[in-house]
Image (cartoon, rainbow, N blue to C red):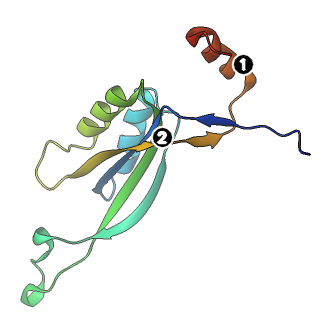
Amino acid sequence: MSTREFTVLTDVSMITCVVQRGKAENVVLAAQDAGAQGATIYYGHGSGIRERLGLLGLAVDIEKEIITILVGDDQLDRVFEKIYFAAGLDLPGAGIIYVTKLDKAATFVPKEVIDRISARTGST
């Protein structure tokens, strides 16, 4: 029998933001400024009507940066708005941002943090 334990987080959402290459660092800094703890950045290729400007109308893949950030639902709106404006998503063709509600997530949470949250919510 293992004595190891883990904490399951249930009030968590994942923000995904797709931006033009070179913009991800500013997006992550804005998210952290709004309270997010960290982010994952990876790269992808996108295509669409804007990329049909290549030779003979052939589609040209454009590199994108994809940022995923897990946040507590209490932080979601604040972080989402900061990311939206930091990424310049109020301009045409700048990218997209969306939220996925997670049923549960697990990671190491220090006992002090669990105790502090439990004290605030009145749960044990």
Report the amino acid beneath label 2.
Leu
Identify which residue, 3 or 88, lies in the foreground.
3
Report the amino acid beneath label 1.
Glu
Q: Secondary structure at mark 1?
A: helix
Quarter the C terminus occupies:
top right
Q: Quadrant of residue 19?
A: bottom left
- Distance, label 1 to label 2, CA atoms, is 20 Å
> Badges 1 and 2: C-beta atoms under 8 Å apart?
no
Question: Residue at the location (19% across, 52% down)?
Answer: 94
Quarter the N terminus occupies:
top right
- In the image, is 116 to the left or to the right of 15? right
Q: Secondary structure at mark 2?
A: strand
Q: Where 63 sits versus 81, above or below?
A: below
Q: Quadrant of residue 22?
A: bottom left
Question: Residue at the location (63% across, 9% down)?
Answer: 119
Question: Residue at the location (36% across, 42% down)?
Answer: 27
The x, y position of residue 95, in whole percent, is 23, 53
Q: Where 29 sits versus 114, above or below?
A: below
For mark 1, what is the residue? 112
Disc sitting over residue 70 in the figure: 2
Identify which residue, 40 or 56, lies in the foreground.
40
Residue at the right extreme of this rendering = 1
Identify which residue, 31 or 120, lies in the foreground.
120
Question: Residue at the location (73% across, 38% down)?
Answer: 6
